[in-house]
Amino acid sequence: MSLQLLCSTVSDGSMKSLNGNQSAARQNRIAFLQRHHINPEDTTLHTLSYGGNNYRRYLTLDSTTKGDGIIRNSTIDADAVVVAEPNHAVLLPLGDCVGAVIHDPTQNILMISHLGRHNLEQYGGTKCIQYLIDQYKVDPSTLIVQLSPAAGGENYPLRAFNDRSMYDVTTEQLTTAGVLTENILTSSTDTTTHSDYYSHSEYLRGNRDKDGRFAIVAVMN
């Protein structure tokens, strides 16, 4: 079974509503999926909230969640989601944080994990892998992990980790859980310096005219 991984850019429009206009963001998601021949009705929007103090919330999706947040209102609130069936796509909007696409090619299990500052400070990179071990008995040494474009350490250092970058901390936490370093593929794109990608932190600094979210989409075919 093959893994398809896509990443939108600013030209595709914001994949998350930031001003209450849910219709525009939903249309952008659907248009992006259709351009890449992914059925919106087979896709789940991965959303998460920052309202509490737990950023290690993990959820296994099933067929009833297909279309959630894409063709109807979103009900997902999780820091990582898991898909264990083919042709079930997941779309995760991002603004600077790391989106980790974690694939077990032996059991055909797919996890999409949101790893931002809040998650990493709670060692989410390790905990999400532990969830796969506990729930699916995966061997972490067989996992293949692809890390999305994200903010680099120069413009977005993590104060809680001695000003290291999100990529460095994410990699360390994943390898602590047993993922092999050579199986972690890191994007070379820094969202704070690359204008093709939205950067929420740069917008807040006044360095970007528009705020928004790009997205990664992953699906096992």
Image (spheres, rainbow, N blue to C red):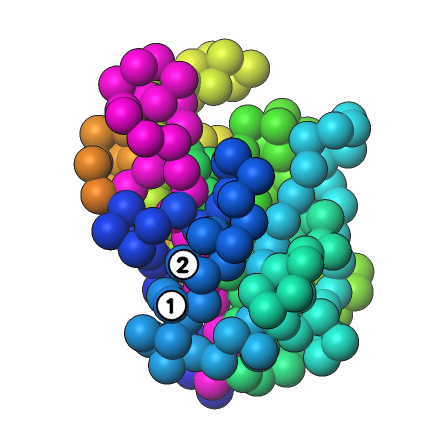
Residue at (62% x, 28% y) in the render: 118
Secondary structure of the residue carrying tag 2 is helix
Left/right placement of residue 91 relative to residue 37 reads right
The residue identified by callout 2 is: 28
Can you tell which quarter of the image residue 63 is in?
Answer: bottom right
Foreground residue among 104 and 64? 64
Residue at (74% x, 56% y) in the render: 75
Instruction: Specify whether residue 123 is painted magenta.
Output: no
Instruction: Specify whether residue 218 is painted magenta.
Output: yes
Residue at (73% x, 41% y) in the render: 56
Left/right placement of residue 121 relative to residue 197 reads right
Q: Is residue 157 above or below residue 93?
A: above
Left/right placement of residue 155 relative to residue 166 reads left
Judge whether residue 145 can be spotted in this image: no
Q: Is residue 143 above or below residue 185?
A: below
Secondary structure of the residue carrying tag 1 is helix
Q: Is residue 27 above or below residue 77?
A: below
Q: Amino acid at mark 2?
A: Asn
Task: Provide residue 101's location: percent of width, then percent of height.
Answer: 49, 58
The residue identified by callout 1 is: 31
Can you tell which quarter of the image residue 141 is in?
Answer: bottom right
Task: Provide residue 74's location: percent of width, then percent of height.
Answer: 68, 56
> Mark 1 and 2 residues: CB-CB less than 8 Å, in contact?
yes
CA distance separating discs 1 and 2: 5 Å
Foreground residue among 194 and 30? 30
Judge whether residue 196 can be spotted in this image: yes
Q: Amino acid at mark 1?
A: Ala
Q: Residues within 10 Å of mark 2 (few under 14, many from 20)?
A: some
Task: Provide residue 189's location: percent of width, then percent of height.
Answer: 25, 42
Magenta segment: 197-221
